[in-house]
Amino acid sequence: MVNTATRLITLVMLLQRRPNQNATQLAQELQVSVRTVQRYINMLDEMGIPVYAERGPHGGYALVRGYKMPPLVFTPEEAVAIYLGASLIEKIWGPLYGESARGALAKLDNVLPNEQRREALWARRSLLVSGLHQIDPLLSAPHLETMHTALREGRRVRLLYRGQHQPEPLQREVDPYLLIHHWGWQYCLGYCHLRQAIRAFRLDRVQELTLLDQPFEIPADFDLHAYLADQPFPGSEIQVRLAFTPDVALVALDNQAYWDTLETQPDGSIIVTFTTPDLERAARIVLAHVAMAEVLAPTELRNLVYERAKAIAARYAPAEDLA
């Protein structure tokens, strides 16, 4: 929640970064009314922060020349955001930024006022993220730092890579564009010279990685957001529709975190949708509800669930049936 103290600090930073803004411009930045901006200016003056107004077409509010806001002035909520953000970065990228995240938190502990420190410590005990990383980030650790160096220095890499359902690895040369954490896995998105196209490489499937001396530049017209909109990363994601009959509708309601949408039908049944990166993960989710839900779409998933169910039934057949 944005409070007055937060907006006052933001106002000082706006004036420090770009002086001579008028009340209308500041109101748009702060998303408040012009009258509120004028009230904030008066409050800053009462606090001893030197703000003055210049008249004329190019005039506006500014801080007295030479005034600088003290460093690391955070509201309790901002301190919490920094603490939780650093902790999350450590979990997502493992050893790549783990030490840096811990170092940043140690420095904050040394400079934050007691109120902010208490709020941050309370949040770290009380606001937890669990189950975000279904995949151990250490699986990518052997190659993550080298790939990070290649990105920073704009250098090509040579890798021995085994793709999904590919029994033998292939050697490729890749210009790495960016690292992505997606569905619990770490990927490198870049230009593959073997395929002459942009490809995504899951780092835990890289068997060998060599940093080359050959430089490259990301094309100026490459737009990541446009690329992902045209081709969802790291391939076509699967949209699944499930139907829960009225007698097991409560199962759907009790697991709403799984679903993208949930619609209750006139007869009391429930239809849900969810998205997964591939059929394999979709089948695992569905099989967890196999006695309670029916796959409506896609057909490929229905067929896969059927085959898996047959294999499970055969494996767990009673002993007398195997005689």
Image (cartoon, rainbow, N blue to C red):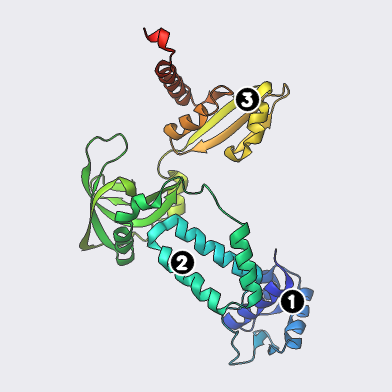
Secondary structure at numbered mark 1: helix
Identify which residue, 180 or 287, lies in the foreground: 287
Task: State the image coordinates of residue 113 (x, y, percent, origin top left).
Answer: 62, 78
Seen in the picture, residue 273 relative to 228 is either above or below; the reply is above
Secondary structure at numbered mark 3: strand
Q: Which residue is mark 1?
A: 37
Seen in the picture, residue 311 relative to 94 is either above or below; the reply is above
Question: Which amino acid does the dot numbered 3 rest on?
Answer: Phe
Total tally of numbered discs in the picture: 3
Secondary structure at numbered mark 2: helix
Label 2 or label 1, whichever lies nearer to me, is 2
**Spatial separation of the CA atoms under disc 2 and disc 1:** 36 Å
**Spatial separation of the CA atoms under disc 3 and disc 1:** 53 Å
Lateral position of residue 192 relative to residue 46, left or right: left
Q: Earlier in the sequence, mark 3 or mark 1?
A: 1
Question: Which amino acid does the dot numbered 2 rest on?
Answer: Ala
Identity of the residue drawn at 46% across and 56% down: 91
Lateral position of residue 290 relative to residue 143, left or right: right
Q: Which residue is mark 3?
A: 244
**Spatial separation of the CA atoms under disc 3 and disc 2:** 44 Å
Identity of the residue drawn at 46% across and 45% down: 134
Instruction: Please tell me how crowded label 1 is: few (under 14), some (14-19), or many (20+) other residues with Cα within 10 Å.
Output: many
Q: Which residue is mark 2?
A: 101
